């Protein structure tokens, strides 16, 4: 678990991922949190079922790079968003992150804080040399989070920006 000033970032186990997908508040109950409404997009549900669940169960992989990390607001005592890696670092030490904040908690700096926390954690891990992220060119809020965390825009194409943060 990663702790920042206002957040706890908690990586989910296989069983917790199943509860997250079920979306019956059993995950919040397990963590002693207040229930919250989340809308799991079809793309996230597909990623969870087809990629994350099998990879988290694979003992040959470091599940921390394959699971969903939930963001828990300490003051609200609720899950307010999620963050994930797109797998373990590649041969060049690069890994990608993606993130989402629940609508009621957007614009409060939570994700900027969460990305700072996860990048500091990644900096301490063996084999991680850089983190990338992709954002839609019109998603100013999303790429502002990256800019505030010193990510540099490295490419643009097909309506997307690619960002990179060197950790060493």
Image (cartoon, helix red, strand yellow):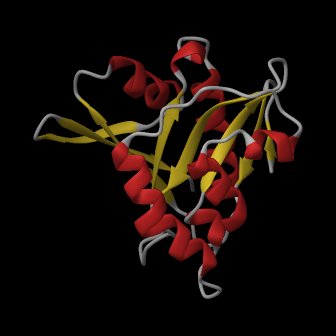
User: Of 4 and 61, which appears nearest the observer?
Assistant: 61
Identify the image quadrant of the C terminus.
bottom right
76 up-or-down from 136: above or below = above
* Residue depicted at x 42% and y 78%: 91
* Residue depicted at x 58% and y 26%: 112
* Residue depicted at x 34% and y 18%: 140
Left or right, residue 10 beside residue 51: right
140 up-or-down from 156: above or below = above
Using the rendered view, name the quadrant where residue 46 is placed: bottom left
Using the rendered view, name the quadrant where residue 42 is placed: top left
Residue 160 visible? The answer is: yes
Q: Position of residue 141 (x, y in %)?
A: 41, 19
Q: Residue furthest right?
A: 32
Q: Position of residue 113 (x, y in %)?
A: 65, 28
Left or right, residue 168 beside residue 49: right
Residue 124 visible? The answer is: no
Q: Position of residue 6 (x, y in %)?
A: 79, 24
Q: Residue furthest left?
A: 158
* Residue depicted at x 64% and y 34%: 114
Q: Residue furthest bottom?
A: 60
Using the rendered view, name the quadrant where residue 152 is placed: top left
Q: Position of residue 155 (x, y in %)?
A: 21, 43
Left or right, residue 157 beside residue 114: left
Number of numbered discs on residues: 0
User: Of 122 and 42, which appears nearest the observer?
Assistant: 42
């Amino acid at each position: 678990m990663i702790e920042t000033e206002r957040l706890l970032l908690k990586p989910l186990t296989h069983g917790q991922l199943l509860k997250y997908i079920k979306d019956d508040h059993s995950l919040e109950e397990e963590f002693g949190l207040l229930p919250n409404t989340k809308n799991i997009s079809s793309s996230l549900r597909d990623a969870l079922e087809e990629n994350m669940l099998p990879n988290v169960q694979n003992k040959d992989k470091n599940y921390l790079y394959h699971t969903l990390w939930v963001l828990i607001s300490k003051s609200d005592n609720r899950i307010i968003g999620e963050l994930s890696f797109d797998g373990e670092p590649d041969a060049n030490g690069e890994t990608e992150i993606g993130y989402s904040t629940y609508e009621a908690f957007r614009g409060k700096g939570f994700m900027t804080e969460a990305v700072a926390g996860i990048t500091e954690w990644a900096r301490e891990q063996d084999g991680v040399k850089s983190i990338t992220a992709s954002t839609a060119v019109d998603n100013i809020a999303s790429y502002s989070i990256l800019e505030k965390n010193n990510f540099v825009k490295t490419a643009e194409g097909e309506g997307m920006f690619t960002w990179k943060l060197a950790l060493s």
